[in-house]
Amino acid sequence: MLNLESKFSYAFYALILMGLCIGPGCEQKQVTNLADHTIIPHPVKITASGGSFLIDNNIIVSISDGRLSSVANYLSKMQSGLKVSESEGDEGILLSLNAADSILGDEGYHLRIEEDLITISAYKPQGVFNGVQTLLQLIPVDLTEETEIATGVIKDYPRYSYRGSMLDVSRHFFGVEEVKRYIDFLAVYKMNTLHLHLTDDQGWRIEIKAKPELTAIGSTSEVGEGSGGYYTQEQYREIVQYAADRFITIVPEIDMPGHTQAALASYPELNCNGKPGELYRGTEVGFSTLCTDKESTYEFVEAVIQELASMTPGEYIHIGGDESHVTEKEDYIYFINRVQKIVSKYGKTMIGWDEIAQANIESSTIVQQWNSAGNATKAAKNGNKVLLSPAKRAYLDMKYDSTTRIGLAWASLIEVDHGYNWNPDTVNAEIPTEAILGIEAPLWTETVENMKDIEYMIFPRLLGYAEIGWSPQSTRVWSTYKDRLANHAIRLDANEINFYRSPLVEWRKSETHTNP
Ligand code: TNX
């Protein structure tokens, strides 16, 4: 018979064997089964192996190739304390380039977590960078003491090559630091494109040296009372570089021939009557147009595109083309056809909102579906690739529910589940899978005035759009997504992000110390 003491210790050991725990340390238990991860976007394949890697702030990050030093430095900056070594190590974290990983494409990666070594390998630095994002989500954001990370292998690559968001810096202007913070947000969820809506009726936001009045006059307004602003070419290049360092491409948009009141106020000759327009601070759309039958209009457009192309290393220039309600249809078509030639003259691929499908667009031109499925279908039939931003599902400026303080509601209310629960393959059934370039979630800023407003509208929906763009449809189930999302509150809170605490999600608090 066991005496009382040994009975007690028997029970104690049993508890340990069962993996249970008692006392204050319990909340700090880490996920030891990799299959129980909360990674967003969901990886393609995860194989758990049941062990654990012990991580603390003294772990060394080493690289197998000099081309990875900036990725290693990014990791160490994001997880402060991790030291970087330029020589290949056999313990700690190893970042490596591997030709065999080319089967996962330029953005894919393998993340192997063994008991002594974590290896991220990929064909390209961009793939390693994506793997780093996954690893960061497995490390507690407040890593202070040695913590277990579950072992196993993650194999991952994106569903679509274009995964992005758009920021409207015209309706309200946002400075370089704010745009950089936005870029940081995108990088964390493996998005690779930031579309900047640089011009609209309310303000012109990019310096064009050949057309100085655009900024001297056209940048001084915005919605409401504010004084607007613009990026000098130097600042724009700084944004492009900051994005490139995070494997994000900037797509600049000059919206034409409508949405041009700021330009019309800056250069009288752009108006058919030759008189200057007035600066505009309201939120109506569809009332302005460049004069499409004047030759000087095309000289103006060429001067703008030439400078924009020269400071934009990315493949795309976005020419807007939406809501040109006061441009005659035949004038609109003539204008888009001519602008397309100018964009290709400067070596870029044109993107436009779905209305451009009414023109004679080249097959390389990208059509961005926001409103008309018919326009996008026409483009796909014409052989064009389509970028999906259906307003009813993907507009970050739509209110979550009728009580949301800011935002619009013309397309839909977009609660977190509504924003998540759609499949790009079937949102427009007429568009074949091969014709879909990817998805983009735009943030229009008529009602969005500062960074806290931006954060509130994009979080947490941005994570859902990142997952729609990256993860296989088979991994995307709202009931499990919302539990993964719940855990991300810890990281959002740690970064002081002002996010919408949707009642549909049981948000975690940082005291529970679970990943991420
Ligand atoms: C429609 S989307 C617009 C924008 C507005 C937005 C507000 C698109 C191509 N045009 O000018 O800002 O709605 O939701």
Image (cartoon, rainbow, N blue to C red):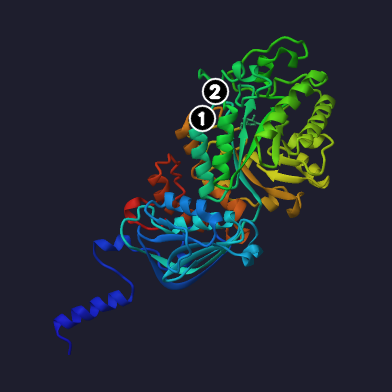
Ligand 1 image-quadrant field = top right
Residue 257 appears anywhere in the view? no
Q: Position of residue 144 (x, y in %)?
A: 31, 56
Q: Is residue 62 left or right of residue 424?
A: left
Say which of 424 and 341 sits in front: 341
Point 50% across, 19% down: residue: 226
Amino acid carrying label 1: it is: Gly
Which element carries disc 1, helix, strand or loop? loop
Specify the amino acid type for callout 2: Gly
The verdict on label 2 being within 8 Å of ligand 1 is no
| Nearer the observer, 296 or 94 | 94
Q: CA distance from mark 1 to mark 2?
A: 8 Å
Q: Which residue is mark 1?
A: 175
Along the horizontal axis of the image, is 147 left or right of 445? left
Q: Is residue 349 left or right of residue 19?
A: right
- Quick check: 104 left or right of 111? right
Q: Quadrant of residue 500?
A: top left
Q: Is residue 244 above or below residue 17?
A: above
Expressed as whole percent of the image width and height from the top left, the position of residue 506 reads 41, 51
Q: Name the residue nearer the viewer: 38 or 87.
A: 87
- Above-or-below relation of 349 to 156: above
The label on residue 229 is 2
Q: In this orientation, does residue 441 appear?
A: yes
Question: Which residue shows up at 77% across the image and 10% down it?
Answer: 273
Q: Are marks 1 and 2 in contact (CB under 8 Å)?
A: yes
